[in-house]
Image (spheres, rainbow, N blue to C red):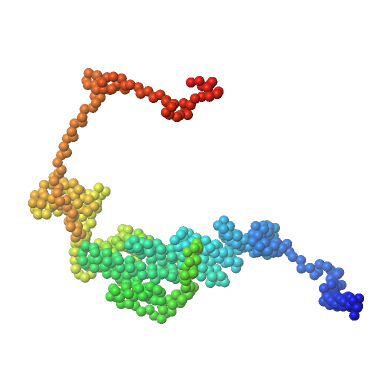
């Protein structure tokens, strides 16, 4: 085949292929325009899906929000509300304005979002979206929570908002999510209180530690370390029992006080075993009860199942998560429970002063068992409100002289009380444990049969006389023993001075030496040295400055002047 024939063959082949492709495209309808029916040609607007202007504004705002153009979205939404206040999109536009502030983030934006959500709840309280708005308000503070050792203000506000959402909208579909968030918030608040209580426990401030730990137990029962808080309460009462055993008081009163604190400690250990049997510190509570020779309770099947469900719902904490928590400012909520009902109301918190009043009331009860009631049931903590009222000066029922205790024995006169003024002196009357007023009687010195002085010597904080009375003459062979300011010092020995001999009068000071420039009565000054006169009467010689030797010394101020300087300054 010739070269011309080959070229013609390729040309016609390419033309045939192009023709076939063009036909296929035409059949596919790419370049084919389908004609409209006659009815639509007559009414061109019949087939258009025309949009309303309020919907157009709302859709445009939603598209801007997806592209993070929050200012443009808020402008369109506000235009919709101002121009079409009765539109069906007005409620959604009001909620969407809060969403734009919420998604923008930042402290100022979050504050604006909260205001928008609150306004939405005010205008549309009965709408289902009101629960969503309340949920978003709580989420605002949830996002701003800090670690337990920081300011808990945002955490407390988050708890309040979630509680309000659960109580006001119980039928909302967001309730399960709100409850879980509330459990996580209460986990952080429990950590905050536990950190403070553990610090007081380490400082052996048992009253403050008990107040903090008891508040955790009453308010956050699902907290991951509630078993440890109960264990610390028991340890604090056990320490109080050991301290009470060292008091030098009546043995019967001491025994009652020690038993009271041991019962409270045992009750706290019992609660750990019965309410949290699957918790990590349940075995420690059993060991403490066995060490106290007390019976160990056994939980039932329901208590075991409930505790196991709570403990298994907690997420494990691995090394990777602990590392992330160390470098972030967000609190850890991984240990929060995922089952159980969170606390929706906070009881009245227990304060440390109430525990101190409780301790004082316990001591009074141990001395006067019939004066004030002990705890209502053995092994339970005191009714703090009743104890506070008693310690604050409520109605009392003192035991009079001759009355007997529940065992039929007469109370021992062991404790006495007296008032001491600011200067350390006794004021008022001495009252024994039977309520008998014995006056300001002072015992005579040891070994002396004489009557005591009419006025008691002033005493310091430990009962030691500071200044011996002037009208008292010791008649016993022990002149250094002074009378005690009280009949009994609680079993403690009275501290007295070893030697009360008055100090001798101080010796007179020696005369001062005569001065150099004393002026006699005649008015003439003696031994006076003038400013320019030496002791011999000659004037001081002036020390002239040595002459400058140009050959030996060098100085810029003595250089030979040249040129114009020589004419201006010849010397």
| Quarter of the rendering containing residue 236 | bottom left
Which residue is at a point 90% across and 76% down the rendered structure image?
Answer: 3
Residue 24, x across and y down, in percent: 84, 77
Task: Answer with left or right where residue 240 lies relative to residue 82.
Answer: left
Q: In which quarter of the image is residue 528?
A: top left
Residue at the farthest front position? 551
Relative placement, left or right, of 132 versus 86 is left
* Closer to the camera in the image, 452 or 70: 70
Q: Quadrant of residue 486?
A: bottom left
Is 368 placed above or below 1 here? above
Residue 350 at least partly seen: no
Residue 6 is at least partly visible in this image: yes
Q: Position of residue 422 (x, y in %)?
A: 26, 48
For image coordinates 46% across by 65% down, the residue present is 188
Using the image, determine if residue 438 lies above or below residue 201: above
**Horizontal and vertical percent position of residue 155:** 49, 62
Return the residue nearer the eye: 321 or 268. Answer: 321
Report how many numbered discs are placed on residues in the image.
0
Say which residue appears at 25% left-offset and 47% top-offset: 423
Question: Measured along the vertical axis of the image, is residue 192 above or below residue 560?
Answer: below
Question: Where residue 370 sits: x, y (%)?
Answer: 25, 66
Image quarter (top left, top right, bottom left or bottom right) of the N terminus: bottom right
> What residue is at 22 percent from the left and 18 percent from the top?
522
Between 18 and 470, which is closer to the camera in this rendering? 18
Q: In this view, does 173 lie to the left or right of 410?
A: right
């Amino acid at each position: 085949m010739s070269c011309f024939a080959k070229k013609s063959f390729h040309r016609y082949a390419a033309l045939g292929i192009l023709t076939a492709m063009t036909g296929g495209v035409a059949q596919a309808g790419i370049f084919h325009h389908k004609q409209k029916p006659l009815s639509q040609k007559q009414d061109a607007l019949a087939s258009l899906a025309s949009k309303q202007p309020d919907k157009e504004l709302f859709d445009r705002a939603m598209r801007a929000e997806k592209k993070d153009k929050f200012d443009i979205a808020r402008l369109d939404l506000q235009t919709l509300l101002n121009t079409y206040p009765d539109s069906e999109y007005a409620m959604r536009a009001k909620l969407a304005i809060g969403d734009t502030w919420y998604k923008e983030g930042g402290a100022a934006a979050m504050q604006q979002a909260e205001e928008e959500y609150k306004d939405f709840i005010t205008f549309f309280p009965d709408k289902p979206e009101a629960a969503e708005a309340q949920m978003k308000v709580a989420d605002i503070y949830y996002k701003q929570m800090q670690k337990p050792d920081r300011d808990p203000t945002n955490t407390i506000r988050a708890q309040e908002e979630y509680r309000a959402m659960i109580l006001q909208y119980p039928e909302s579909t967001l309730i399960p999510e709100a409850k879980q968030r509330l459990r996580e918030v209460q986990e952080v608040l429990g950590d905050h209180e536990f950190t403070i209580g553990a610090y007081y426990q380490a400082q052996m401030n048992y009253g403050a530690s008990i107040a903090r730990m008891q508040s955790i137990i009453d308010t956050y029962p699902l907290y991951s370390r509630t078993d440890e808080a109960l264990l610390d309460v028991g340890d604090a009462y056990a320490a109080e029992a050991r301290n009470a055993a060292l008091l030098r008081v009546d043995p019967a009163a001491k025994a009652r006080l020690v038993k009271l604190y041991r019962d409270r400690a045992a009750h706290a250990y019992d609660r750990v075993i019965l309410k949290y049997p699957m918790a990590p510190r349940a075995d420690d509570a059993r060991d403490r009860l066995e060490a106290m020779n007390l019976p160990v309770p056994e939980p039932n099947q329901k208590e075991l199942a409930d505790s196991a469900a709570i403990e298994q719902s907690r997420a494990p904490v691995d090394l990777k998560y602990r590392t992330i928590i160390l470098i972030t400012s967000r609190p850890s909520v991984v240990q929060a429970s995922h089952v159980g009902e969170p606390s929706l109301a906070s009881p009245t918190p227990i304060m440390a002063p109430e525990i101190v009043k409780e301790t004082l009331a316990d001591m009074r009860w141990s001395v006067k068992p019939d004066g004030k009631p002990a705890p209502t049931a053995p092994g339970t903590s005191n009714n703090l409100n009743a104890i506070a009222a008693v310690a604050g000066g409520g109605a009392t029922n003192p035991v009079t002289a001759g009355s007997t205790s529940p065992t039929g024995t007469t109370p021992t006169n062991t404790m006495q009380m007296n008032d001491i003024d600011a200067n350390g002196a006794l004021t008022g009357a001495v009252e024994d444990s039977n309520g008998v007023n014995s006056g300001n009687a002072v015992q005579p010195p040891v070994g002396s049969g004489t009557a005591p002085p009419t006025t008691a010597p002033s005493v310091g904080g430990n009962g030691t006389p500071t200044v011996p009375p002037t009208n008292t003459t010791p008649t016993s062979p022990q002149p250094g023993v002074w009378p005690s300011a009280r009949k009994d010092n609680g079993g403690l020995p009275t501290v007295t001075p070893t030697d009360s001999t008055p100090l001798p009068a101080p010796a007179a000071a020696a005369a001062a030496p005569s001065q150099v420039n004393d002026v006699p009565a005649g008015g003439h000054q003696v031994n006076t040295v003038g400013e320019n006169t030496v002791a011999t009467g000659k004037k001081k010689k002036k020390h002239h400055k040595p002459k400058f030797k140009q050959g030996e010394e060098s100085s810029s101020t003595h250089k030979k002047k040249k040129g114009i300087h020589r004419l201006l300054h010849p010397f």
